[in-house]
Amino acid sequence: MAIVTRVVLDVLKAHQPNALEFASQLADLDASCQVNLLVQEVDDKTQTIILSITGERLDFEAITQHIMSMGGSVHSIDEVDVQGEAITASSE
Amino acid sequence: MFTRLRYLIELSQSHRIARRYFVTNGFDGVLAMLGLLMGFRVSASVSIDVIIGACVGAAVALFMSGLSSAYISEAAEKQHELQELEKSMLTSLDESAHAEAAKLMPLLIALVNGFSPLLLALLILTPLFLFQQQLLPESFFNFSPLDLAIIIALSLAFMLGVFLGRLSGRFWLWTGVRSLLIAVITAVIIFFLNQFMAQ
């Protein structure tokens, strides 16, 4: 199965938790996980954010679950970086 | 567990509501106790057991009233907030921390609202409890246990005012004196009302 190393997500979230808390909690999912959060639009009760998450082996399911548990909803997957496991195995 | 609870409080901003409830219902409790104690102070002498019985009864009633009223109103309010948020998000938030907070926070706020008058009332009644258990003399620096309880009630009213002043960033002494003044005015009204009714 291909290894996901980077995803860029368009997410709609409530104002709370704030951007710092939101990004920090996602980054805590994995030690190699690095999160970049950009607030794109602020409405009365919601914010549209662009999340760029990089890591050695991202668990996309866990990421979306965690986003949902924080009151966010993934609108689209805008970018992905994946690596085939067979290529990784041969390079090793 | 406490980390999760702190996160949910932060998420729902419930600490602000709980703080407000603590002061408003706490002040209610202090004034209710002050009213009762002043009533006993100016009326014909009553046994300490009767005073304690009446005051504890009132404190428990304040606890139950605070607990139930805050729970009912906050549960409805939090549910409404969640529904509004779901409308904005165009999705269900049932699995989110927001839904968890909407269920748990009304309970927490209700506990604060219930316990604040109860604990303050018990604090006010401490001299009476001590006297009942014969741990306090009938006259302590020329003050009876009832006088001491009234002094504690006035001090707590002042301290609640100071607490509010520190929160709002206003001069603590002014807000403290203002709360104390309200308590003193209450005591004076009760005093004159009792004098008037005795005639």
Image (cartoon, rainbow, N blue to C red):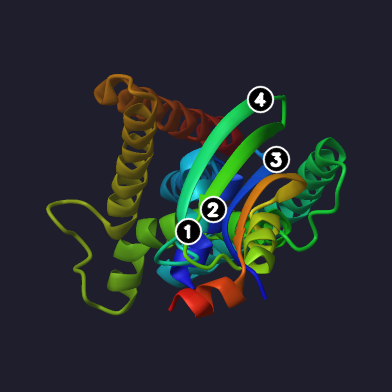
Query: Please, which chain is the residue tagged with disc 2 on?
Result: B
User: The residue under label 4 is which amino acid type?
Assistant: Val
Q: Are marks 1 and 2 in contact (CB under 8 Å)?
A: yes
Q: CA distance from mark 1 to mark 4?
A: 25 Å
Q: Which is closer to the viewer, label 4 or label 3? A: 3
Q: Position of residue B41 (x, y in %)?
A: 41, 48
Residue situated in front as seen by the camera: B96 or B66: B96
Q: Position of residue A16 (x, y in %)?
A: 59, 42
Q: Position of residue B127 (x, y in %)?
A: 29, 63
Q: Which is closer to the viewer, label 3 or label 2? A: 3
Quadrant showing the N terminus of chain A: bottom right
Q: CA distance from mark 1 to mark 3?
A: 28 Å
Q: Which mark is residue A42?
A: 4
Q: Which residue is mark 2?
A: B9
Residue situated in front as seen by the camera: B18 or B3: B3
Query: Please, which chain is the residue tagged with disc 3 on?
Result: A
Q: Is residue B91 above or below residue B95?
A: above
Q: CA distance from mark 4 to mark 3?
A: 14 Å
Q: Which residue is mark 1?
A: B6
Query: Please, which chain is the residue tagged with disc 1 on?
Result: B
Q: CA distance from mark 2 to mark 4?
A: 23 Å
Lateral position of residue B158 relative to residue B21, left or right = left
Q: Which mark is residue A10?
A: 3
Badge 4 element:
strand
Q: CA distance from mark 3 to mark 2?
A: 27 Å
Q: Residues within 10 Å of mark 3 (few under 14, many from 20)?
A: many
Badge 3 element:
strand
The residue located at (65%, 51%) in the rendering is A80
User: The residue under label 3 is which amino acid type?
Assistant: Asp
User: The residue under label 2 is which amino acid type?
Assistant: Ile
Residue A22 in sight: yes
